[in-house]
Amino acid sequence: MSAPLFLMASGLLAGSMNALAGGGSFVTLPALIASGVPSVMANATSSVALYPGGVASAWVYRHGLGPVCRVPLPLMLAVTLSGGLAGALLLLWTPGAVFDRVLPLLLLLATLMLVFAPKAGGWLRDHVTIGRPMILPMQFVLGLYGGYFGGAVGLMMIAAWSLLQGADIKALNAPRTLMVTAANTVAIACFAIAGAVAWRSALLVGLGAVAGGYAGAHLGRRLSPALVRMATLALSALVTASFFIRAYA
């Protein structure tokens, strides 16, 4: 398979995964690295390629936007943008050799969130409660992570916000999509200005991701959610293991 077709195919699979269960970056990031894009640039390029899908999700959820646990949305947005900027700059300042060692740990963290977040959320809400003054520092850290890497950051936001007393879990999806998109927006702007995006590769992956998102939305009506989740977790674990071998073996 030629390199352009390989990148488009990876985008197709990633877009389908994001539409079905999330985790698309587990496909696009290794595909970009395999195609010869350096790891830091590959991470930035993957964010750019998958960005339109996030914007579309935020637009769909726009009518459900409101305060996050009584914290005004503009304040949450400002903190998230600040964190996303800090994370993007931190990524750009990270030497490639260092990022290659850190990347497996980030993938492992994202994989663990995919595995445990759905079940751990209820347990945490029953046993842990935090006050509102903690939400802004937490949000800055989440924004920083989103700008730096971003794997499963949406799940992390839901998990963190759900620990606040009086949190309405059903009302958190709309602000979550906005905050994730906000962190990605400022990060992508930094990557573009710094020349850290392989634009041709981003276009190829992005075209595939758009088609994959459309196909995945239709497949989601027919496939078993349990089967989709199992396949996503298996792929995430396989990619994480391969990056540990690549970095440390």
Image: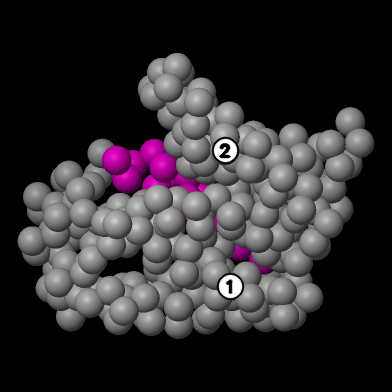
Question: What's the amino acid at mark 2?
Answer: Gly
Residue 242 sits in quarter: top right
How dense is the environment of label 1, judged by Cα within 10 Å: few (below 14), some, or many (20 and up)? many
Q: In this orientation, does residue 166 appear?
A: yes
User: Taking 24 as reference, is 67 above or below it?
Assistant: below
Q: Position of residue 100 (x, y in %)?
A: 70, 61
Query: Which span of residues is magenta-colored?
Result: 99-118
Q: In this orientation, does residue 160 appear?
A: no
Say which of marks 1 and 2 sits in front.
2
Q: Which type of secondary structure does the marked residue at label 2 adopt?
A: helix
The quarter of the rendered structure image containing the N terminus is top right
For residue 187, which numbered disc appears in the image?
1
User: Taking 53 as reference, is 98 above or below it?
Assistant: below
Residue 77 sits in quarter: bottom left
Residue 3 lies in the magenta-colored region? no
Residue 116 lies in the magenta-colored region? yes
Please tell me which residue is depicted at 17% across the width and 67% down the height of the picture. 69
Please tell me which residue is depicted at 72% across the width and 80% down the height of the picture. 193
